[in-house]
Amino acid sequence: MKVQNITNIDKFFQVIDSCKGKVELVTGEGDRLNLKSKLSQFVSLANIFSNGEIPELEIIAYEREDVEKLIKFMMSE
């Protein structure tokens, strides 16, 4: 799923952390990074957050309830 225009980064990661299953970020090169890993959150995404907003990401959530949780977050953003 594509995630766009996230301005509340803290809330975004709270939602990610609350997910029960694996949530991955798909990089431009096609690599998949575990977004539930704090190291991945800080190191892999540091350049995306340089202006305080996430313009667009592709993420994969494997559990249905996690997908629903992420969609609910995006709709409230």
Image (tube, rainbow, N blue to C red):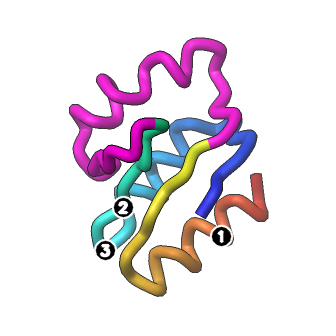
Q: Secondary structure at mark 3?
A: loop
Locate residue 46, reporting x and y percent.
43, 20
The residue under the point 44% across, 64% down is 60
Question: Cα distance, mark 2 to mark 3?
Answer: 9 Å
Which residue lies under the disc numbered 1?
A: 71
Residue 53 vs 66, above or below: the answer is above
Locate residue 28, reporting x and y percent.
48, 37
Residue 76 vs 57, above or below: the answer is below
Locate residue 13, reporting x and y percent.
45, 46
* Residue 72 belongs to the span the image colors magenta: no
Give the mark, 1 or 2, whose residue is nearer the N terminus.
2
Kind of residue at disc 1: Ile
Q: Secondary structure at mark 2?
A: strand
Highlighted range, magenta: 29-56
Based on the displayed image, in which of its 4 quarters is residue 2 positioned?
bottom right
Which residue lies under the disc numbered 3?
A: 20
The residue under the point 37% across, 76% down is 62
